[in-house]
Amino acid sequence: MADPTGFMKFEREEPKKRPREERVHDWREVYAEASPEARNKKVRVQATRCMDCGIPFCHSGSSGCPLGNLIPEWNDLVRQGHWAAASDRLHATNNFPEFTGKLCPAPCEAGCVLSISPASGGPVTIKQIEATIAEQSWEMGIVEAQVAEVSSGQRVAVVGSGPAGLAAAQQLTRAGHEVTVYERDDRLGGLLRYGIPEFKMEKKHLDRRLAQLRKEGARFVTGCEVGVDLTVEQLRAEYDAVVLAVGALRGRDDTVTPGRELAGIHLAMEHLVQANRQCEGDGPPEIDANGKHVVVIGGGDTGADCYGTASRQGALSVTQLDQYPMPPTTRDDDRSPWPTWPYILRTYPAHDEGGERLFGVAVKRFVGDDEGHVRAIELQHVRVTRDRETGVRTVEPVGDEIETIPADLVLLAIGFEGVERMRLLDDLGLSLTQRGALSCGADWQTEAPGVFVCGDAHRGASLVVWAIAEGRSVAHAVDTYLTGSSDLPAPVHPTALPLAVV
């Protein structure tokens, strides 16, 4: 069994980052490299802090990991140095642990019993342990292609190659179905490729998994917009089932603030996609922060990605705006009691690289020059309220004071409105819900027979761990639809939601 006093013997220790002065001048991942021996020794100590709780909230689908990762089991295997066994237990529930180990904000750590009280020293570094198991697995050569022994003779089309689509494709391929993944971009990966900056996850990790899927038999077609280049009639004729994993990429815009029409104001994804394309070797971006005062509007993950990207492009200054007041640095048990996701200030590595964050402010007006290009922003302090009955949010100024800050490039990172409008949905006879998503039944099937949905297209913009969980679950549903039953795991139900205080 685990060491029940390990958390008292060892302190929580985060992975070390490369010096700020070094990492802002390249696109490599922010964390410092270490020899496998040193890395594994440190991670084994961190795994020893896991108590193997009687009720492990860390892998509870509602308060921890929706994949149901067997966290206490592989923590104890790592503690003992049984890396192959730890890899087996980790891959039993997660197709792509290096994706989640690098990109997931770790609701498992928020649900760790050691998160109840600061006196414990903080939760187990589950995310770091997971990423290390994944890397060690590749280094040991124990990640192999799992080729189906028997073919079902059934064909499945997966539309979209993000984490949900790739998880569904891998599970269905391993079940013996002939799977083809269609991607409208020129490269595979969806947001993993063009939305996530290289400094958060180098794309070699994605390419490595894609190679594994190819060896297992999955086929990929890039530069193909299903519904246009491949019609719905052709899709129906060639495939026995279709999985829609098209994401929720319709970015929310600011349509009311005076001056929005000025040049130099862009949606966040326009900036991030071009920066990622430059890292892929496609040449310099049109939207470049070099030599500019950059303002990022929005305090979430996408805003932080823009923040770090602008710093690496050589911005003169970077300022991130958030309408909400600065969150507390420790959990407020009245607002977000354990084991719910805590409402706290989240500081990303990008925020340590310079720049400034302003809270409780909103843009009153974008100010331009004589040539119609944004040059400054007028800010007001605001208060955000929400009607408890209707849920309608109101942003009200606090006082008349106006502050002007320079802005040559403005990036709107204020969320996503749902699935993009596309001919594919029209020809399938599918409409979006009020929140811009695609609905489905308990079997993940949409109103179009034989057409299933998963990931952000179904849930709305969410976490990579939820995308993989939904991809695995929809694979179970499709396998059942095609063969009558399925042994594939289904970690989440379409109606599943994380535990929250309402």
Image (tube, helix red, strand yellow):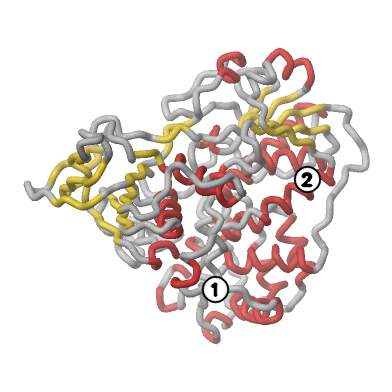
Residue 148 picture quarter: top right
- Going from N to C along the chain, the mark reached first, 1 or 2, is 1
In the image, what residue occupies the spot 49% across and 35% down?
249
Q: Residues within 10 Å of mark 1 (few under 14, many from 20)?
A: some
Which is more toward the observer, 226 or 477?
A: 226
Task: Name the residue furthest right.
Answer: 149
Q: Number of callouts in the render?
A: 2
- The residue that label 1 is drawn on is 15
Please tell me which residue is depicted at 34% across the width and 47% down the height of the picture.
298
Does the residue at mark 1 contact the one at mark 2 (Cβ under 8 Å)?
no
> Looking at the image, is 474 positioned above or below residue 210?
above
Residue ID at (45%, 54%): 309
Q: Front-most of 272 and 372?
A: 372
Q: Return the x and y of residue 496 as percentages of the image width and height.
A: 54, 41
Picture coordinates of residue 208, whole percent (x, y):
73, 54
Q: Is residue 340 visible?
A: no
- Residue 220 in view in this figure: yes
Q: Which residue is mark 2?
A: 213
**Residue 237: numbered disc:** none
**Which element type, helix, strand or loop, lies under badge 1?**
loop
| Separation of residues labelled 1 and 2 (CA atoms) | 30 Å
Q: Is residue 281 above or below residue 222?
A: below
Q: Position of residue 81 (x, y in %)?
A: 74, 77
Amino acid residing under circle 1: Pro
Q: Residue at x 67, y 60 (%)?
A: 70
